[in-house]
Image: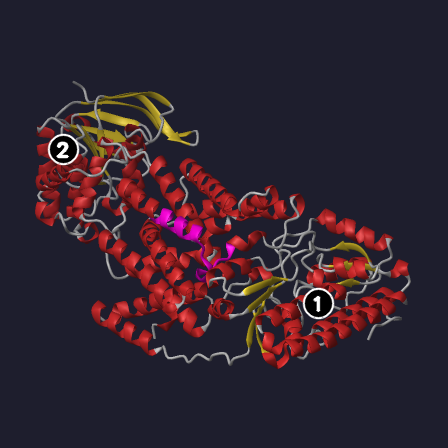
Amino acid sequence: MLQPFHYAFVQRGLLEVALLSVGAGLLGTWIILRGLAFYSHAVGTATFPGLVLADGLGLAPPLGAFAAAAAFALGVERLAHRRREGHDSLTALVLVGALALGVILASDVFHSGSNVESLLFGSLLVVGRSDLWLAAAGSALALAGSAAAGRRWLAVGFDPGGARSLGVRSAVPDGLLLGLVAFAVVSSLAAIGALLATALFVVPAATVRLWTRRLPPWQLGSVALVMAEGVVGLWLSVELNVPPGPAIAMLGGAVFAVSLAGRRLLPARRLLAVAGVALLAGCGVARGDGSGRLEVVATTTQIADWARQVGGEAVSVHQILQPNTDPHEYEPRPSDVEAVAKAKVVARSGAGLDDWLKRVETEAGGGSAVVDLGAARRDPHWWQDPRSAETAVAALRDAFSRADPRHRPAYRRRAARYLDELRSLDRELALCFARVPARERKLVSDHDAFDSFARRYEITVVGAAIPSQTTQAQPSAGETARLVGLIRREHVRAVFPESSLSLRLVRTIARETGATASSTLYGDSLGPAGSPGATYVGMERANADAMARGFTGGVVGCG
Amino acid sequence: MTLLRVEGLTAGYDGRPVLHDVGFVLEPGERIGVLGPNGGGKSTLFRVLLGELDPFGGTVYAAARRGFVPQTERSRLDYPVSALDVALMGTLSRAPWWRPLRRSDRRFALDSLGRVGLRELAGDRFGELSGGKRQRVLVARALVQDAPILLLDEPFTGVDRPSADALEALLAELAAEGRGVLIATHDVDQVRAWDSVLCLNGRQVAFGPPERTLTRAVLEETYGGEIVALPGEEGAGILPPHHH
């Protein structure tokens, strides 16, 4: 039952939870007493403009996050000081400003890359050394702040009017509270992410509040509950193979609901016993194990396909991203970290598409050979060019042969056959596009996923509907209007939505220009099993066919 | 030494005055009752005296620290504080905000709870005390502040008879020690036992000793003619419409 806790990455997650729990539990009570729940939820998300700015200026992302959180705290504090409104409406006001600023910066100033908001998503499974230090600092500051200013926070919350007449100048201590909450929430982002921060900062404290009406036991109880929910959530995460953040959030919500219901029915002690038994009874999930084959981890769908083609029966491929997933909304699951830890070969796409793997690697212990297939590339979508795929497949073949010399002949044989297939695919597509007049080979898609493909087959990329690669970016009306003008001037016949992103914008542009938008392209990942794009070769053929038909109004196909 | 001197005071909100031309003095040992309808300017006057609101005109001279005793219903009754915690809030004004609590602070707070007769209930949760006891805890808090001037906002509202008597005795005692006490109230009869009365209705209607000031005409002007006259001598037995 305690087996999950033997993994080094789980132990580090436990340490992170323990370090966070002091600050989260302690500040949680103040957050509830002072009506700051929405503020504590918002401050994590409000770091977005700071992340964009840090990315654009080449600074460390946490620096941008902390600066943005500090500015956010200061903005709310100044407004709260001037206008005696509740913090909720002021928080909403400043949050809207911060997010709007972030979207404008990402879309129109920096044209941010796809990984800019990765700091908003976190996971207990991949915390690094600096995250542990930050969590410790957040908790230490929360303790010191509570000891110094806690009585003032209490007095101002008790009766704001009365506190003023007590000679409490609330601006400094109140600003301190907002600042501490901001620091603690941002220091927890790497572990839990902005969307779920309240699972640590609000839910446990609200739960304990149901059971006690005294401050000291409430604070101690909240710290203990954050720690308990973190530990049990982490354990559940490994046993059930779900991401730990949502596991902790669901657990916290369930404990709160049970507390609320049980508060009326049962005395406290008996209820805790019942809850404990129910939790323990919920465990007993069996776990499978590998079977002597070469363990390979592939980050993306296309790499997993290549690895299966080259490895055949001799390898067991663990594929991290699933078809049609957005790479930056990915949160590692325990099985991913475990697979990386056990793997002999880890193959990644590189060039900015799967940067999160670095953290999984360091967490897993780094005993495996990591093959960065896109190390020399600048375009994250380099693999859309079949000739680049050939290079990658050769690299996989060599890596497999080194790690598993026993099956070297089989790897060589299978790789040679697959490389032939890729070469004939490339010839076939080149011939197909040669039948499309050069002036008709004009591509408009929804983001820049096809630069490499277009360069290979001499297709002109006229434009993309979304001006940068982060999904947080939005096109301005002016940019969309420019693109519409360009499409009309260049007589572009078809625009292509991509299967994993929103169709609506591209459809709007199509309606505006009279171009068709009937075929989608596979941009970031392969399609699900059973679809034409389920394999790399099938995906390339489907894309080429859709483009050729679109360019020529259906006259030329590559089917 | 005069504790409080107010002259020609005009105050209000957002540029609109709600209180005109107020002038009175508070001497040590005096209790002044402040009468007036809701919205008549009592709270506005208190906020100016506490320094929360800047007056539009006139002068306010305060010789000493002012302690405020709010209505207990304005405090959050579900708040996780004991009577002692509330009394201890009175120490906040006397030290910089980062200074930790000292043992002498705690002793002083317990003594002050003793002064209001609640030493035994120091550990009880504030929200679970009766209205009268909560009011006395808030008085204890003002005592911990060591304020020579006390402002009480309708302390007798929602308080049962025994508690009201205890509170009344306490106020007499505090005045006898040389403090100046300003009490907003709706109880005209109660005010008669005090030293002065200040009648407000958007402006100062009258100020002076109750026996001379509380005439039928003044009360009608203060409460806008809505008073109920009970049989009896001139001025006695007159109740404002929202008497509790």
Circle 2 Cα neighbour tier, 10 Å, few/some/many (<14 / 14–19 / ≥20) = some
**Which residue is label 1 attached to?**
A522
Q: Looking at the image, which is closer to me, A533 or A86? A: A533
In the rendered image, the quadrant that contains the N terminus of chain A is: bottom left
Task: Give me the residue at 66% from left, 70% from top.
Answer: A397
Q: Please state the horizontal and vertical placement of residue A233, each as a whole percent of the image.
A: 38, 67
Q: Secondary structure at mark 2?
A: loop
Q: Please state the horizontal and vertical placement of residue A364, each as a whole percent of the image.
A: 47, 63
Task: Give me the residue at 17% from left, 37% from top.
Answer: B102
Task: Give me the residue at 50% from left, 64% from top.
Answer: A367
Chain letter of mark 1 equals A
Q: CA distance from mark 1 to mark 2?
A: 89 Å
Circle 1 Cα neighbour tier, 10 Å, few/some/many (<14 / 14–19 / ≥20) = many
| Region of the chain picked out in magenta, as a range | A120-139
**Which residue is label 2 attached to?**
B192
Q: Please state the horizontal and vertical placement of residue A260, each as a whole percent of the image.
A: 31, 66
**Same-chain check, marks 1 and 2:** no
Q: Please state the horizontal and vertical placement of residue A491, each as a whole percent of the image.
A: 87, 57
